[in-house]
Image (cartoon, rainbow, N blue to C red):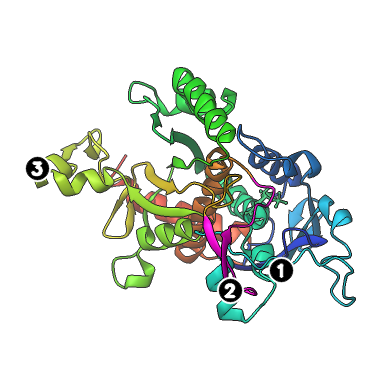
Amino acid sequence: MLRYLSAGESHGPCLTAIIEGLPAGLPFPKEEIDRQLIRRQKGYGRGERMSIEKDEVHVLSGVRHGETIGSPLALSIRNRDWENWKETLSPFHAAFNTRAITVPRPGHADLPGGLKYHRSDLRDILERASARETAMRVAVGTVGRIMLSYFGVEVFGHVVSIGKVKAETKDLSVEEIRNLTEESPVRCADAQASREMVKAIEEAKAYGDTLGGVFEIIACGLPVGLGSHVHWDRRLDGRIAGALMSLQAIKGVEFGLGFAAARSRGSEVHDALYYTPEKGISRFTNRAGGLEGGITNGEALVVRAAMKPIPTLNRPLPSVDLQKKQEIKATVERSDVCAVPAASVVGEAIVAWELACAWKEKFGGDSILEMQEAVDRYREYIKGFLL
Ligand code: EPS
């Protein structure tokens, strides 16, 4: 089983994670994790914090001479901003200025978290609720991604809408979407829509507002058979949707046709099967988004996630001071105007991690050699049906 736990506050000294279950002998290019961390930090609409941070992973255990050795992997990412928060967030000494927050931001974890954990200073909640934590999710997801790409599975994401601006990508190949996305300041493959998205972010910023959007993640090279129909918690669509929904500000997830399937007839929704001796079983469409019955079906996995606008507004909404029990405008904290491009990179990591977990479940192996043997055996068996 592949699993991890993470820890760390947004302005604390660092983010930390422990990963367990990686096969030994997996080549481990640390530079790939750093490359993904840099991708996450980019994207038009980010706030000042990103000019302070320069994320880089430190590998503390589990890797020797560039290969995993089977022991738990400990990772750490430094928060450079900690220098400015040492006193305020000191674990042991009460600070002169605690920068206490008593006015919750509507839409944020501030209020329910503060009440649940009985914290009068809502900073105790927002420090961990912050999307700073997603830097570590990218590092952990990239570890899963390194294992997947060893077996030829690739995962990438792109932004399909920001606010009311929608990208048009239906005439583009997966490869074209991938390349164009890397060139766009908002990680969108449609150049015209990219420009309009940047404009929409500028307009929202000028108004003291924020913007959400939708990103799509595509995974190619997956075999039939990851996940299972036999139990609710083994259905891979459920796991991926749950994991994506756990990303800050995500409000909806859909696979393939998604919500549009509910407005169509069965004959317009399901992917018909064809057979030729040369090609084996094949489909001409992928409306299911690569999953049937909670199991990968050999097509590309296509999943979209909808992100609400960030709740920290420069023109704040009405709220209540919890100490004074008075109505007042919500707290204004330094924040991003739009983090959808960054969220799409985090989404890639989240999907990669869930796929890596399902991969480990299916093929097992304490070493990469054992895993490779199981993969080869299975591919040989499945070749008789699908090409
Ligand atoms: C975030 C608020 C901002 C973002 C942060 C998420 O941080 P700060 O309060 O320090 O300005 O920059 O995102 C990151 C730090 C990051 O690495 O993505 C929030 O409240 O969620």
Looking at the image, is mark 2 or mark 1 nearer the viewer? 2
Give the distance between the C-alpha atoms of the residues marked 2 and 1, in whole angstroms.
48 Å
**Residue 46, labelled with which disc?**
none
- Count residues near mark 2 (Cα–Cα under 10 Å), then give few for <14, some for 14-19, many for 20+: few
Side (left or right) of 190 relative to 135: left
Q: Is residue 102 magenta?
A: no
Mark 2 or mark 3: whose residue is earlier in sequence? 3
Q: Which amino acid does the dot numbered 1 rest on?
A: Pro
Side (left or right) of 347 relative to 59: left
Mark 1 or mark 3: whose residue is earlier in sequence? 1
Residue at the (38%, 71%) spot, across then down: 233
Give the distance between the C-alpha atoms of the residues marked 2 and 3, in whole angstroms.
57 Å
Instruction: Quadrant for residue 219, please give it.
Output: top left
Give the distance between the C-alpha atoms of the residues marked 1 and 3, in whole angstroms.
48 Å
Side (left or right) of 88 relative to 29: right
Provide the residue designation for mark 2: 325
Q: Which amino acid does the dot numbered 3 rest on?
A: Ser
Looking at the image, is mark 2 or mark 3 nearer the viewer? 2
Provide the residue designation for mark 1: 72
Question: Residue 267: x percent and y percent?
Answer: 9, 42
SS state under label 3? helix
Residue situated in front as seen by the camera: 109 or 320: 320
Provide the residue designation for mark 3: 267
- Count residues near mark 3 (Cα–Cα under 10 Å), then give few for <14, some for 14-19, many for 20+: few
Magenta stretch? 318-335
Say above or below: 260 vs 225. Answer: above
Residue at the (47%, 35%) spot, across then down: 159
